[in-house]
């Protein structure tokens, strides 16, 4: 999905920076995603393989994403070999979570 039309108006990241941010997420998914699930309609659960610097990479990306898209709630659960990342949204942003979940499809290791 290269079209950024799904990015909501409430996102404050400058338009020219959005493809770069999407690329960062895609890189994380392609490098580290081992599983994803939707335990609730408004929550996406991602399991990422750990390793040197991975937790810091995830936390940095989450912090920057929270700064421009305040409708996301991120929860990281660090582990030795696996990092859990829960992403939650409110009802008004369910379509954004759907789009994010679609981006993860097919990128699992």
Image (cartoon, helix red, strand yellow):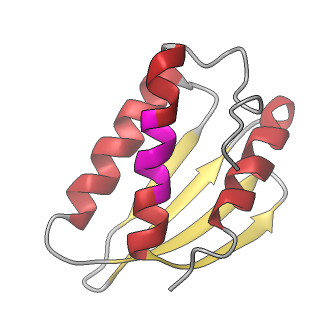
Q: Residue at x 76, y 70 (%)?
A: 39
**Residue 23 within the magenta-colored segment of the rendering:** yes
Q: Residue at x 69, y 70 (%)?
A: 105
**Residue 77 within the magenta-colored segment of the rendering:** no
Q: Position of residue 24 (x, y in %)?
A: 40, 48
Q: Of 49 and 39, which appears nearest the observer?
A: 49
Q: Quadrant of residue 80?
A: bottom left
* In-image side of 102 versus 30 (left or right): right
Q: Main secondary structure of the magenta part?
A: helix
Q: Quadrant of residue 104?
A: bottom right
Q: Of 47 and 6, which appears nearest the observer?
A: 6
Q: Position of residue 15 (x, y in %)?
A: 54, 16
Q: Position of residue 94 (x, y in %)?
A: 82, 42
Q: Position of residue 35 (x, y in %)?
A: 58, 81
* In-image side of 26 versus 40 (left or right): left
Q: Residue at x 66, y 58 (%)?
A: 103
Magenta residues, start to end: 20-26
Q: Quadrant of residue 40?
A: bottom right
């Amino acid at each position: 999905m290269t079209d950024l039309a799904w990015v909501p108006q409430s996102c404050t990241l400058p338009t020219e920076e959005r493809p770069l941010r999407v690329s960062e997420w895609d890189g994380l998914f392609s490098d580290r995603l081992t599983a994803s699930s939707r335990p609730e309609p408004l929550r996406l659960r991602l399991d990422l393989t750990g390793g040197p610097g991975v937790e810091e990479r995830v936390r940095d990306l989450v912090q920057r994403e929270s700064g421009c898209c305040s409708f996301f709630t991120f929860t990281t659960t660090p582990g030795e070999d696996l990092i859990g990342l829960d992403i939650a949204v409110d009802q008004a942003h369910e379509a954004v979570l759907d789009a994010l979940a679609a981006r993860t499809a097919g990128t699992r290791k």
